Amino acid sequence: MTDVRRILAIKLRNLGDVLLAVPALRAIRESHPEASLSVLVARGTEEMIEGLPWIDEVLTVSRPRGKRGFWRNLGQELGFVRALRQRRFDMVVDFTSGDRAALYGYLSGAAVRIGRDPGGKGFAGKSGLYSRLAPPPDRSAHAVENDLDLVRSLGIAPRDARLEFFIPEEAGRRMSMRLAELDIREGEPFLHVHPTSRWLFKCWKDEAMAETLDRVQGEMGLAVVMTSGPEEREVAKSRSILALMRRKPATLLGETTIKDLAAVSARASAYLGVDSAPSHIAAAVGTPAVVLFGPSGEHNWRPWGVEHRVVALDMDCRPCGKDGCDGSKVSRCLTDLPPEKVLSALEEVLRARKVVEPV
């Protein structure tokens, strides 16, 4: 593939998935240093890779609404495909494995189109849209390793499996000013906590999180900065936690961009959260992380490439991948998790960084 000059990588997934693809994307870049690299992601996830100097172009496409979203917006989709074809890509690497990404790759006109063997999933004839098929992903492996395995199937040996995240200077300055307004001085140690996920069944119970954060501030003497996603239900859940706390932490609820959130994590001594994109962002900026896992599997989604602790209960039914127990939207493997396990993990991380003395 020495004549490859224009490469398109496709990752039409959620925020964390896009970030975890960075090592594989970088391996493609390093293997084709003279080629241009464009990355296509779902609109709203582009901040995860924007600013990385070795990506030439980040393309976005809106998420389809409903199962037939592609066909309902056929005119818009055809216009997007025309724009792809005008770029004259030589090679497409599809990290998504979805029907839509497979169609984009085929319709781009690229001669070389690499993707996963769909194994009978998706529409009839889907596998024929690729010029080369890699084996299906290993469900027991980490998401980063699965993306790297797809790259390895091309004969590329990745040299660097680090995550990488670009924080603009303006985001760093903006968050420094906001933290100062919240009495978090430059250089002062603090715990960044992001207690929510877009999927609330991944979240800990409010009472346990409130007790843990009260004890972090009281027993460990460590300041806490709480953030949340912008969705109202995430903000509301964070406020419910705050209402149960005796010691009110600094808060930035629903007011940070993804880049801002990374700037806060980069300043923190440690991070506490659940299985969600902010946990991967913390790892990408090098902040030690304590992450709570319930129905999702830490073998697939644990923090990558950074000192971390996974806190989870040893239960035969987890990880189940379900949105709560028996359709309840509440996960017992999380609600039964005691604060002591989380505090112990936090103490280990903070003591290793010489931030606090043993409690």
Image (cartoon, rainbow, N blue to C red):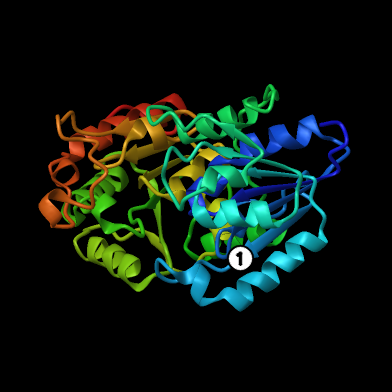
40 and 99: which is toward the camera: 99
x, y (%) of residue 283? 51, 38
Q: Is residue 106 left or right of residue 116?
A: right
Q: Is residue 8 left or right of residue 118?
A: right
- In the image, residue 183 sits, relative to residue 223, either above or below, namely below
The type of residue carrying mark 1 is Val
Within the image, what quadrant is residue 237 found in?
bottom left
x, y (%) of residue 274? 34, 46
Graded by Cα atoms within 10 Å as few (under 14), some (14 to 19) or many (20 or more), the crowding at tag 1 reads: some
x, y (%) of residue 7? 76, 45
Identify which residue is drawn at 40% across, 34% down.
300
Residue 189 visible in the picture: no
Residue at image mark 1: 61
x, y (%) of residue 121? 41, 45
Image quadrant holding the N terminus, namely: top right
Residue 95 visible in the picture: yes
Identify which residue is drawn at 13% across, 45% down.
332
Identify which residue is drawn at 68% across, 51% down.
39
Identify which residue is drawn at 38% across, 50% down.
193
Q: Secondary structure at mark 1?
A: strand
12 and 192: which is toward the camera: 12
